[in-house]
Image (cartoon, rainbow, N blue to C red):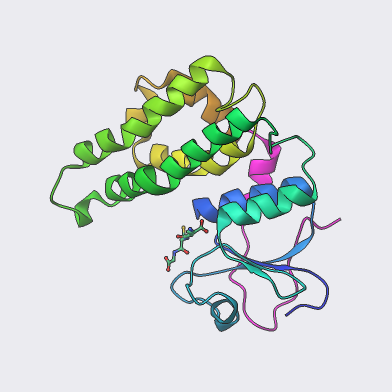
């Protein structure tokens, strides 16, 4: 591996990789970014994380973190300039509840909604309605505060909005006219952040021997 920087294997559009890049970006830790083509995963990535999902963070001491949420927590434990990791126990519980629902129930509904033709047992509308259970939860929270668990952005917002973005992209018109007005404002605010635009920069797929592509270059 690189002598100088931790390595992040990533895929630009993957919501798990987006959340990891957001946390690494905000904590300003320099890493080498290796853009991965999911259909052609580099051997170097599979050697350090055989399960073959992105993101994967390979640290200089050879530790491998291959769960996006763990990468976020690792980065924020180094530097958390905007207090994304709230110390409030109640809010941490709510954060865990929302992220767990997102990563399990919602993600499954999202995949069915997005690829409804692969799951002909039910209609696309049915899958969308299943996904709306989570949207209703989020809308309710956003009726209480500007962001999901607080009036400022926290881990919950950053871990979840890449998935809501994906949901919206399936049928933008439907979402535009839906009842989820607070989610609409919340999502637009997050998509407008400079940090989001930065983590969505495009990079060509990495190949051994390529020049190092730094992420968070100083
Ligand atoms: N639990 C993992 C899930 C990561 C994940 O499933 N990533 C997808 C891309 S969005 C992936 O790498 N899939 C493997 C593949 O498509 O071959 C995490 O949070 O990091």
Is 209 displayed left or right of 3 in the figure? Answer: left
The question of residue 200 being in magenta is answered with yes
Compared with residue 206, is residue 72 higher up or lower down, i.e. above or below? above
Please report the bounds of the magenta region as a residue range. Answer: 191-218
The x and y percentages for residue 89 are 63, 32
SS majority, magenta = loop
Q: Is residue 27 above or below residue 129?
A: below
Answer whether residue 65 is visible to the viewer in this image: yes
What residue sits 48% from the left and 72% below the top?
52
**Image vertical order of residue 195 relative to residue 205, above or below:** above
Q: Quadrant of residue 150?
A: top right
Q: Position of residue 213 (x, y in %)?
A: 73, 67
User: Which residue corresponds to the image point at 33% horizontal and 31% vertical from the top-left?
Assistant: 133
Give the position of the C terminus as an image quadrant: bottom right
| Residue 201 appears in the rendering | no
Task: Tell me which residue sits at (60%, 35%) in the image.
Answer: 92
Q: Foreground residue, 89 or 64?
A: 89
Is 30 or 170 nearer to us in this picture? 30
């Amino acid at each position: 591996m690189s002598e100088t920087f931790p390595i992040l294997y990533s895929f630009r559009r993957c919501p798990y990789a987006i959340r990891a890049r957001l946390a690494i970006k905000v904590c300003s830790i320099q890493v080498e970014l290796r853009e991965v083509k999911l259909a052609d995963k580099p051997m170097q990535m599979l050697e350090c994380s055989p399960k073959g999902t992105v993101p994967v963070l390979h640290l200089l001491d050879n530790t491998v973190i291959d769960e996006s949420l763990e990468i976020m927590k690792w980065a924020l434990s180094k530097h958390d300039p905007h207090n994304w990791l709230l110390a409030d126990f109640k809010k941490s519980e709510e954060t865990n509840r929302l992220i767990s629902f997102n990563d399990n129930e919602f993600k499954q509904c999202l995949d069915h909604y997005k690829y409804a033709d692969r799951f002909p047992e039910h209609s696309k509308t049915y899958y969308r309605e299943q996904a709306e259970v989570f949207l209703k939860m989020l809308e309710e929270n956003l009726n209480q505060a500007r962001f999901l668990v607080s009036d400022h952005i926290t881990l919950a917002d950053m871990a979840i909005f890449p998935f809501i973005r994906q949901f919206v992209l399936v049928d933008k018109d439907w979402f535009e006219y839906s009842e989820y007005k607070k989610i609409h404002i919340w999502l637009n605010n997050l998509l407008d952040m400079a940090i989001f635009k930065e983590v969505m920069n495009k990079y060509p797929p990495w190949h051994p021997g390529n020049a190092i592509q730094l992420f968070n270059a100083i």
